Image (cartoon, grey):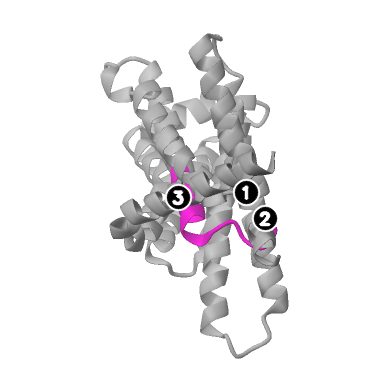
Amino acid sequence: MSNIKEQVETFSSRAEDVVDKIGQPLKPYIPIIGRFLIVATFLEDALRITTQWSDQISYMQDYRHFPKGLSHLFLGLNVVVMLAGSGLVIAKRHQDYAVYGLLGVVVAQALGYGLIFDLSFFLRNLSVIGGLVMVLSDSMAKQRRMFAALPQLSESNRRTYLQLAGRILLIFLFIGSAFHGEWSFIRIMTSVVGLTACVMVAVGFKAKWSAMFLVLFLSVFNVIINNFWSVTHNHFKRDFLKYDFFQTLSIVGGFLLLVNMGPGGYSIDEKKKEF
């Protein structure tokens, strides 16, 4: 049994070395790519509301029963906050305020569009929130390095908790997708492998390797399943597929930040270093 364990650990270590070697040229660009992907769903949503302004106003007034002025204010504020917050996240400026603003948009839209009790929407948005939490954790790491001479115990603990929360929240998209749809042998095997990787991310065991696997898995899944470009422009399904596509991109961005930052202190990977 111990020999099998040693062989698995040796194989995983070699696999990690290969992945690190292949990904080395991209490593400097992973943080900015991750940040851009995390806010991709907000940028797309802001563009969609702007280009479909009259349809959005009609929906808010006719179906959600918003008063005329309030519907304009609600949508306008959403667009402004999403554009400003996304720009700040990409530029690494005032990231805490940007993240709080985008979190406010997620909650406001869930309430405003009446989707708070939609399980699929709820799980997807938990994962999007996980990506934003990873951004917040990363911004705290930058601040800690900037003020390294000052006591940072509480800030370090806060960052560690945020990394743990971000890791756990990120996996909810896959959990929701794994149990949704028709079952087949390939579907079962894919779900088992994906859920195993999700558990490894959540507990922080081989977290970087598992997160990279989920980045590749979700990217392929996104292109195959959420291919909105193959649907005609006037088909109602196109907007739903487009929405899911960009939300999945945002979650992929969260996993990329996890690959870049590591799982944090509350993880098996970090605890193993102490022994």
203 sits left or right of 239 in the view: right
35 sits left or right of 178 in the view: left
Give the crowd class for mark 3: few <14, some 14-19, many >=20 residues within 10 Å.
few
Above or below: residue 161 compared with residue 66: below
Q: Which residue is mark 1?
A: 205
Q: Are marks 1 and 2 in contact (CB under 8 Å)?
A: yes
Q: Residue furthest bottom?
A: 149
Kind of residue indicated by mark 2: Ser
Kind of residue indicated by mark 1: Phe
Give the crowd class for mark 2: few <14, some 14-19, many >=20 residues within 10 Å.
many
Name the residue at 65% across, 45% down: 202
Q: Quadrant of residue 238?
A: top left
Above or below: residue 267 compared with residue 230: below
Image coordinates of residue 219 in percent, x first then y, are 39, 35
Q: In this figure, what is the number of numbered marks?
A: 3
Q: Which residue is mark 3?
A: 14
Kind of residue indicated by mark 3: Arg
Q: Quadrant of residue 96?
A: bottom right
Q: Which numbered disc, 1 or 3, marks the residue closer to the eye? A: 3
Which dot marks residue 267?
Answer: 2
Image coordinates of residue 2 in percent, x first then y, are 68, 43
Specify which label sits upstream in the sequence, 3 or 2: 3
Q: Secondary structure at mark 1?
A: loop
Question: Bounds of the magenta span?
Answer: 252-266
Name the residue at 51% across, 74% down: 142
Q: CA distance from mark 3 to mark 2?
A: 21 Å
